Amino acid sequence: MKPQLVALDAGRHNNDLEGSTSRIMEGAGWKKQRIIVIIPAAAQMPTKAAMALWGLAFPPNQQVYRLAALGMEVGEAYSNAIEQVLANPELKDWEYILTVEHDNIPPWDGLAKLVETMDKHPEYSCVGGLYWTKGECGVPQIWGDPQDPILNFRPQVPRSGEVQECCGTGMGFNLFRVSMFRDEKLRKPWFKTLNGTEGVGIGTQDLYFWGDARKHGYRCAIDNRVLVGHYDVINDICW
């Protein structure tokens, strides 16, 4: 270091106190933002996905509870885990459930952005990060055009940087309000994978849930600022 004269420096954040305060207010991390993380997983998780979760930033000094649902079909894993949350006398009153799947790679600040968005948009009961189905012809998991009077789950074109309402989300990186699962009007199990054996076609557990939730007025969106990778461990490709 070169020799220098040191004067009092209050710091960058204090020198722009109005702007710094506004940033803290918008981030909403100063409020009670307790988060339950649910990860449905097989016996192993890819290292790249695990590293991303280790680096995920949570709101400072907030309570976090991590719950891994092992060895279950994914729909059963989500439904059973949430049942356990609601049966717990402390967890049932927490603010959020974060669902993270074992092959998704969220950005380090992705959760902070979802918390910010949920605070700004109380009309949404769930906001997710943007990720795509795997493969060269993958589509964005922004399911359904809410402007269409007929409920649908067609993939929508992402609008860069926007919070984009849709009819259903994937489950790879979603922030849900715990309160919605206390609504007795929602059918149970909440999440169910349809494999064609029940005479109602086939379908994934996420859209099975939203097909019911939308009927009861629950809304969801994708925060297109939060770009989430979908990792193919066999080919070492992140879609």
Image: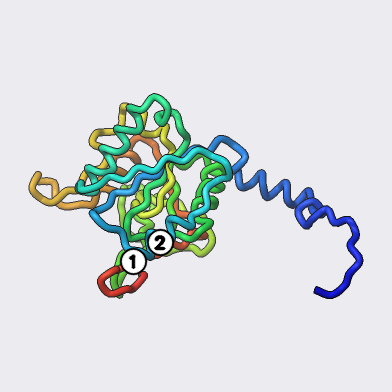
Camera-side residue: 53 or 197? 53
* Label number found at residue 231: 1
Q: Identify the residue shown where x is 45% and y is 39%.
A: 96
Residue 173 in view of the camera: yes
User: Which element is circle 2 on?
Assistant: strand
Task: Name above or below for residue 69 compared with residue 184.
Answer: below
How dense is the environment of label 1, judged by Cα within 10 Å: few (below 14), some, or many (20 and up)?
Answer: many
Please tell me how crowded label 2 is: few (under 14), some (14-19), or many (20+) other residues with Cα within 10 Å: many
Mark drawn on residue 31: none
Between 238 and 224, the one lying in front of the other is: 238
Where residue 220 appears, as percent x and y from the top left, is 42, 46
Labels 2 & 1 near each other (Cβ < 8 A): yes
Q: Which mark is residue 105?
A: 2
Give the left or right position of residue 201, taking residue 191 as reference: left
Tell me the kind of residue under disc 1.
Tyr
Residue 183 in view, yes or no: no
Q: Name, please, the residue furthest toward the top.
A: 89
Residue 217, image x and y in percent? 39, 36
Residue 60's spot in the image, x, y percent?
Answer: 58, 45
N-terminal-most mark, 2 or 1? 2
Quarter of the image with the C terminus is bottom left
**Picture layout, residue 191 above or below residue 108:** above
- Report which quarter residue 188 is drawn in: top left
CA gap, disc 2 to disc 1?
Answer: 7 Å
7 sits to left or right of 80: right
Q: Which residue lies at the image location 31% right of the left edge and 45% below the top edge? A: 68
**Residue at coordinates 30% horizontally, 38% vertically from top-left?**
81
**Callout 2, which amino acid?**
Ile
Q: Give the quarter of the figure containing the N terminus.
A: bottom right
Q: Secondary structure at mark 1?
A: strand
Q: Is residue 124 left or right of residue 137?
A: right
